Image: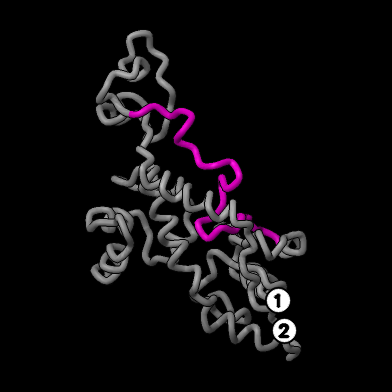
């Protein structure tokens, strides 16, 4: 079982065997678990930097873009508890102007070249966390831009403002915790990401409501137990 999970993780781009083992030891047992985790949570796994965590999240999100929500969800959509059919509208396609499409390609190229920004001496001292902090020391070689001391975060590395923060698919990633908030979303530009803390019953309700509105779901659940199953 462990070997199968590790092999599944190594099929993801930029994840080698040691990273896959670290993810398994951290409690991740499927690609679905990686999809539900945040980049910050993945970066806390031993051997995975912030930049690698972002890359893994992007790759896993792309894997799940074309996957359906699973047989259990499809069966639930055939009818509710009263036997009434639920109307399902096909997910709307992304509506983006040509300039924004061009900027998305520019952003993709920039992210591929973007270095991993870490605070000074992070590789020397275990107590220093793997995140960016601007050096302030008077004698800091990194602050003085000494070659070989690491890159400084500065203007030029950021993504174009018009597409900053968008999901790789081009949709605006909206974290969703409540069913009633779905009515405020635009299916042409916004997509749903179900929060990790949402329970199974409410997750099912969000999925059914989102699909009835034609909203795209970025992290659809792959497996779901029947709603009337008793908790032992």
Residue drawn at point x = 39 percent, y = 27 percent: 152
Asked if the magenta segment contains residue 141, the reply would be: no
* Horizontal relation, residue 168 to residue 185: left or right: left
Position above or below: 219 against 107 = below
**Residue plotted at (51% across, 42% down):** 159
Q: Which mark is residue 212?
A: 1
Residue pictured at 38% horizontal, 40% vertical = 114
| Residue 157 belongs to magenta span | yes
Q: Is residue 173 visible?
A: no
Q: Position of residue 113 (x, y in %)?
A: 36, 43
Going from N to C along the chain, the mark reached first, 1 or 2, is 2
Residue 71 shows which numbered tag? Answer: none
Q: Main secondary structure of the magenta part?
A: loop
SS at badge 1: helix
Q: Which region of the structure is painted magenta?
A: 151-178
Q: Is residue 39 left or right of residue 10?
A: right
Q: Nearer the viewer, residue 34 or 141?
A: 141
Instruction: State the residue position of label 2.
Output: 86
Residue 3: image x %, image y %? 23, 68
The residue positioned farthest toward the bottom in the image shown? 83
List x then y, in percent, for residue 20. Answer: 28, 58
Tag 1 near tag 2, CB within 8 Å: yes
Can see residue 224? yes
Task: Name above or below for residue 144 compared with residue 12.
Answer: above
Q: In what element is the residue under mark 2?
A: loop
Q: Residues within 10 Å of mark 2 (few under 14, many from 20)?
A: some
Q: CA distance from mark 1 to mark 2?
A: 7 Å
The quarter of the picture where the N terminus appears is bottom left
């Amino acid at each position: 079982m462990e070997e199968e999970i590790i092999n599944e993780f190594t099929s993801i781009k930029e994840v080698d065997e040691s990273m896959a083992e670290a993810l398994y030891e951290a409690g991740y047992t499927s690609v679905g678990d990686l999809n539900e985790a945040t980049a910050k949570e993945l970066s806390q796994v031993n051997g995975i930097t912030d930049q690698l965590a972002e890359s893994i999240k992007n790759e896993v999100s792309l894997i799940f873009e074309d996957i359906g929500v699973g047989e259990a969800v499809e069966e639930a959509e055939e009818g509710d508890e009263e036997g009434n059919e639920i109307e399902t509208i096909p997910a709307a396609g992304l509506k983006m102007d040509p300039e924004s499409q061009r900027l998305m390609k520019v952003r993709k190229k920039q992210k591929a070249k973007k270095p991993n920004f870490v605070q000074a001496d992070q590789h020397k001292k275990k107590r220093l966390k793997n995140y960016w902090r601007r050096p302030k020391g008077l004698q800091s070689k990194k602050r003085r831009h000494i070659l070989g001391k690491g890159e400084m975060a500065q203007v030029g590395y950021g993504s174009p403002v018009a597409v900053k923060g968008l999901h790789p698919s081009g949709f605006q990633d909206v974290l969703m915790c409540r069913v009633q908030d779905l009515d405020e979303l635009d299916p042409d530009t916004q997509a749903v990401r179900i929060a990790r803390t949402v329970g199974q019953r409410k997750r099912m309700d969000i999925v059914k409501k989102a699909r009835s509105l034609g909203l795209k779901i970025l992290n659809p659940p792959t497996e779901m137990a029947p709603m009337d199953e008793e908790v032992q």
